[in-house]
Amino acid sequence: MDRAFDTQPIVLLHAFAGSGKTTTAAEFARWYQVTGGLDLPGHPEWPGAVLWSSFGHHLTANRVIGTAGDFFAPLLEASGIAWAAVTDSGERRNIVLQLLAQVSVLWVWDNVEPVTGFPEGTASDWTTADQDDLVELLRDLAQQTRCKVLLTSRRDERRWLGDLPARVQLPPMPMRESLQLAAALAARHGGNVAGADWRPLLRYAAGNPLTITVVVGQALRSGLAATAQIEAFLSRLQAGEAELEAGEDAALGRTRSLAASLSYGFAEASMEAQRARLAVQHLFRDTADADALRYMGVQEAVGDDAVPELTGLDRDAAIALLDRAAGIGLLTPLGGGYYQIHPALPWYFTSLYITTYGRPDTVAAHRASRAYSKAIGGLGNSYHHEVGEGRAAEIVPVLRVEEANLRHALDLARTNRLWPAAVGCLQGLNVLYERTGRNGEWARIVAAITPDFADTETGAPLHGREKHWSTVTSYRVGVARQTQDWSTATTLQHARIAWDRDQAAPALAGPTSSLTPEQRNEIRNLEVSLSDLGNILLAQGDPSCLPHFQEALTLAQLIGDRAEEAEDAGSLGNVYLVVSRLRDLDQAEHWFRHSLRLRDNSDRHGRARNFGSLGQVAMERFDDALTAKEAEPVLLEHLNTALRCYQQTMDFTPLDDHETRGVTENELGNIYGRAGQARQALRHYQQAIQHHEIRGNIYAAGRTRQDVAVLLANDGRIGDALQYARAALHNYEQAGPGAADRADRARQLIAELEQHNR
């Protein structure tokens, strides 16, 4: 790679999955920087910089540029460029390219194979325009800058990138390092490799780290310690190759030695009797889940699609089975009943699956596929419910692990027209994408699944799918709210309320004591719909939101749902806080504290929002006290109360909850701005803008930029304030008609600043 970068600015490191590409890229980046590869002639003070962008999730060229701009924001600010005030994508790109033309940088683009779909033929989350834009950015970096880009991929990407990069194929592990790995594996097993010649076995592994791990692990577990024993083991492995189909290995991304060693380990572990149970791992993606595995055999969970071979498998037995699979190298335990499937090994489960259940169109294979979709969909529903009960802190990490299964099960459920399973998968993905700020990906999924449930012309529910139509409509409402499309959001929400009210009518007509679980859920659906409409109206400052929240609160109390009551109480607090005609800070604080009392201690997300709301109340009290010209100690007390509340919010908020962190950083900026500490305020505002842009929430980014403009204007920096005010206006114009009022305020601010600047 070093030699390639001597003459080429773009280098692609490629090898099969699990070969160590990411680890190699990270170590190369460290080594390249410390050994002077990023030195800048004439500037000995420049240490070089390493940027890292992972393409495991959807990442456009514009967001990639944003990553670089955020990294170099302090340097740009020192040069007089207010990066956080730049919103035009072309201008942002030009600024970053100009900067990278002056400084030496190594930029790692890791795991780029999903950009065009991997494996071959898989649909990509990147449009053709997205793919072309990334290639064009690479060309610009190569031709206009000092930047060196190291890409990693499982394939050579010639169809996508052509001759743009120099290509380096990751070579086999040399014998010296193979011996070191074998020694480390032996130490982990409480033994050593001394006293025997392991080199013939390591040569057989052909320098593949995964194969070495598997074959050496099997030898150690078998207690092999003498050279003769190892040679006999090798002979058995070589004999096993004869049973494999010739010519498949390269196409499947494996070596014959790996295939033979896994087959040997499978037989030696006496797992033939468990073949049918283990084979269904073919359906799983990235992670095997003991609970999903056992649910696939439970009729109460998956109905008539229950897999007979999995019947009677309880959780302990499922974990014991997966532990044995981990023992021969097929899986890696993650804890909690979850196991990582090594990315180089799905072919092995596929071969087991086909020999056990047949091709996908056979009855047995089709049944197993449906059972998998239903099991994962059921877990998605369960995860969504637990988050609603305030356990997001424990569930979101699980959802990260299960994401690939939720996506795959969703695709299978849509293909098989298993609509309840599809919605269950969506419920889990909705929580994950909402909490981790992946709005763009979620919007694409919602757009794709909407025609499965709603008439494309009228928007009415398709026959037989009315129940799930309501849930999908709530997703569409959420997407519309993100883009400030209030007309669409309101229309959809009214339709949803009408449906949910009709469904809940029989339950509401009878005594509460006789409500069935299904009736309680119907009432809960209506409660959530009313609350959602209230939030749409609240966001527009419409006082008619109040009765919707009040009715929702009454319904939550009716069915004894403390979690939903806490949400509705918090919403009532927001009404009295932000709707000017109903403003009452005492009432707002009352409802926020009531909401906080209702929260379970494990509901970190809900408690974080409550503390943030109490911080808002304190800020409003500060503004009122300032208008009333109260004494400085009173003002400071309000500011410090607000600061403590927002600090508690940050303590409860995960690093990747970009929504909450964006809002909180903005409020911290407001506090320091009120205190006259402009530099500290600006730092928090800039952090807020980064969080908003990661989420793709340009409206929120505009509001923060407008706050910065006011801050800088009050600090006498009129020219800088104008930059931010114009950037805010650009954000509002991008956000659409729903931001028209904010856009008008930005134009007024710009006019005032321009007048002052003359």
Image (cartoon, grey):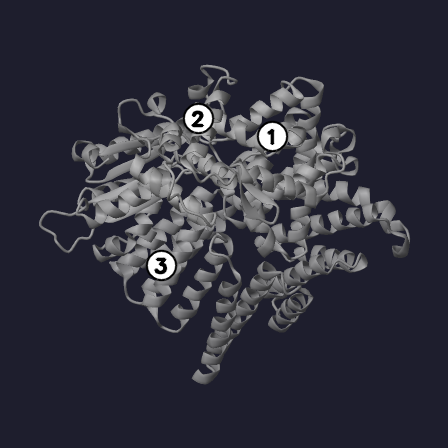
Q: Dot 2 surroundings within 10 Å: few (below 14), some, or many (20 or more)?
A: many
Q: Which residue in the rendered view is the most extreme toward the top? A: 246
The answer to whether residue 485 is visible is no
Q: Dot 1 surroundings within 10 Å: few (below 14), some, or many (20 or more)?
A: many
Q: In the rendered structure, which disc, 3 or 1, sits on the residue that comes first in sequence?
A: 1
Residue found 29% across the figure and 41% down from its top: 107
Position of residue 726 measured from the top left corner of the image (x, y, whole percent)? 35, 50
Q: Dot 3 surroundings within 10 Å: few (below 14), some, or many (20 or more)?
A: many
Position of residue 18 measured from the top left corner of the image (x, y, whole percent)? 42, 35
Disc 2 vs disc 3: which is toward the camera?
A: 2
Q: Which mark is residue 283?
A: 1
Q: In the rendered structure, which disc, 1 or 2, sits on the residue that comes first in sequence?
A: 2
Q: Kindly identify which residue carries mark 3.
A: 709
Seen in the picture, residue 613 relative to 49 is either above or below; the reply is below
Q: Secondary structure beneath disc 2? A: helix
Badge 2 amino acid: Ser
Q: Secondary structure beneath disc 1? A: helix
Residue found 48% across the figure and 61% down from its top: 664
